[in-house]
Image (cartoon, rainbow, N blue to C red):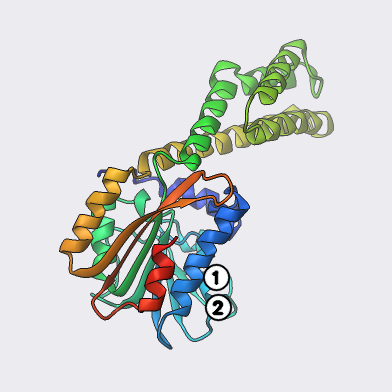
Amino acid sequence: MGRAHGAGHLWADYWADAPPESCTALLPEDARRAIDAVWRNAVEALDHGASVLDIAAGRGAVLALAASCRGDLTLTGVDSAPASSVAPANETAAGFRILGDVDAAALPFPDRAFALVASQFGLEYADFDRALSEAMRVCAGRLLLLVHASDGIVVAQNAGEAAQIEWVLDTLRLFEKQARAFRASSGKITATVKAALDMIDKQRTRTDNPRLLDAIMQGALQLHAIAARHGAAAALEAAQAMEARMRNHAARMAALADAALGPGDCERALGRIRDGGFSQYGLHEVRAPQSGALTGRWICAARQGGDHPENRSKTHDA
């Protein structure tokens, strides 16, 4: 199960601006509520003073939820992005800490150091086999992993956005046309640029997910406003920055698609968990309650004596 890795800089840029909950923000609301309920159940079942590790924590959405439920837990996150992008400005106020520049496949913790080892749409971005071994190694009690499904709605949506970016940048060559317009006529929209924008506008009416194309249209018009107010040089600089953000977004979407796990991948992971000494383990699909759309899969396990029976049922029903 070789997976995407080595793209830490992409996520550093992303987490520098993205809100903590952004990894689930575009899921259906009922799916987000169902996911949060599983995390709350898991956290509330922990013993007093228990330690929790969130792997590939981003800016700490799961840890923040845990801190809101319990004030007695020791909450730690790790992420491949630098701490400057992901660590809370005030760890005491946040109730958790996040260590940056940490490879999920080489965790800097002793064996069985955490009562709960968690990951929300993150562990699969590392070398998954090694990262799973490390998660198992540091887990003394429960293992609860939410992973992207290769056959799910998130991968499909992101593949569509990556294709939209490629079309705008490399087929329409929107920014190349705008750059020529900036140099020739300051902020005026030339016929060539207008034709490209018209094509984007028509495409956005034909797609089920026009969010990205809407943003591109707005951004393109803002570039012309910048050119009119501040000159061609400022507009060109802004256009280069916008194109770089779009290419980074497309690269992250490609990494997500490469990282996502299929049913067979998850079943093999369960086999490794079973062989690793966990006495309870299960695989459960995450579907939006109303639409039935597949949004991910839970991989859950517990060591003998490390799980609460009442919480087992809540988790396995996810």
Give the percent coordinates (x, y) of residue 185.
79, 17
Relative to 256, is 173 on the left or the right?
Answer: right
Residue at x 70% of width, y 24% of height:
205
The residue drawn where x is 41% and y is 74% is 311
The amino acid type, in three-letter code, at marker 1 is: Leu
The residue beneath circle 1 is 65
Residues under labels 2 and 1: Cα distance? 6 Å
Q: Position of residue 93 (x, y in %)?
A: 60, 79
Which residue is the extreme one toward the top?
A: 191
Q: Nearer the viewer, residue 91 or 264?
A: 264
- Numbered disc 2: secondary structure: helix
Assign the C terminus to one quadrant of the image: bottom left
Q: Are circles 2 and 1 on residues that touch, CB within 8 Å?
A: yes
**Residue occupying the point 48% across, 68% down:** 39
Per the rendering, the mark at residue 69 is 2
Asked if 113 appears above or below 48 in the picture, the reply is above
**Residue type at tag 2:** Cys
Q: Position of residue 232 (x, y in %)?
A: 74, 27
